[in-house]
Image (cartoon, helix red, strand yellow):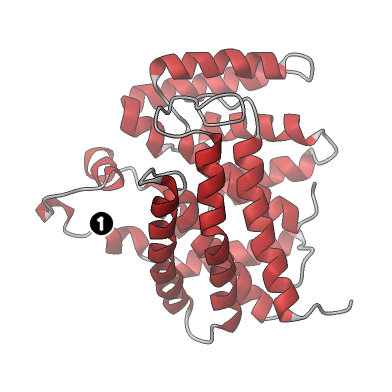
Amino acid sequence: MTLKPMNELLVEIAGQAEKALLYEVALTPKPGLVDRNNSGAHSDMDFFTFLDSIVSLSPYLYQYVKLGMEHEGTAKELFHKVRSIGVHAEKAMLAATKNINTHKGANFSFAVLLGATGACIGRGLQPPFTQNDTQEVLAYAQEMSHGLVTDDFADLAAKTSLTYGEKLYLSYGITGIRGEAEAGYPALRELILPFFRANQRQPIESLLLKALLLLMSQVEDGNIIHRGGIDAWQTIKMEAKQLLQDSHEGNLKELMYSYDLVLIERHLSPGGAADLLSLGIFFAKLENLF
């Protein structure tokens, strides 16, 4: 196999991450989420807000990969490097969206996973990835994130101002995307990527819609819990599972359009599942699954 130049790999990997974010927002209809049809359960953002946000993050996606490729220290040191750049990326996003949080969670995860991808490529990994290559990246991301929940949530009771992620941790013990990262992204490793690998010959639109429902039916979603509480989240998990069972190629979109109206009425948005979907798309692209 001919090895690609590092700069070419940088552009390719960052481009796949940007493409994953674009695929996620373009996917329609998504229950309660911003898509090409409507703004879901959001009154402060639309499809174009997301496009502005993705463009603002694009140069930082490249930087995350580059930092990983050039890193020579420990995995934890790389985490601190990409997180520092991630703060600047978030500021750029908020400037582009007029202070609307479109991709805060996705930016955090892409910082970690692109840094890990870059580090593994720096050690010889080359796309297209095998399943084992992806596992190696996720394992490195887990190493990067070791102790993250404890580090970030220490002394919360003494703080006067809390983020909603911190409030969820104090109220329910919900660890959110920090816990997902520290566990090596089990939602990717054990759920969404096996689903993509097993169904890669399906039309991409229906594949991604089913993948979103699969995530909604199983993963912890801080966005839903923040808006509606634990009961609302448990209800959506059951409803998404039922939709998966009831859907087929002929009725999937119709069911999703109807459920979108339900979640809009409840003012609930499965943003955590949407972020994980974009991460899954990224690795599926690296594995040439679609």
Front residue (pair 33, 91): 91
Front residue (pair 57, 134): 57
Q: Quadrant of residue 154?
A: bottom left
Evaluate whether residue 269 shows in this view. yes
Q: Quadrant of residue 43?
A: top left
**Residue 206 left/right relative to 91:** right
**Residue 152 left/right relative to 9:** left
Q: Position of residue 6 (x, y in %)?
A: 71, 80
Q: Residue at label 1?
A: 153
Q: Position of residue 115 (x, y in %)?
A: 55, 69
Which residue shows up at 39% across the image and 21% down it?
267
Q: Position of residue 60 (x, y in %)?
A: 52, 65
Q: Is residue 14 above or below residue 268?
A: below
Front residue (pair 129, 110): 110
Q: Residue lying furthest right in this view? A: 1
Judged from the image, the secondary structure of the residue bearing numbered disc 1 is: helix
Which quadrant of the rendered structure holds the N terminus?
bottom right
Badge 1 amino acid: Phe
Which residue shows up at 67% across the image and 30% down it?
209
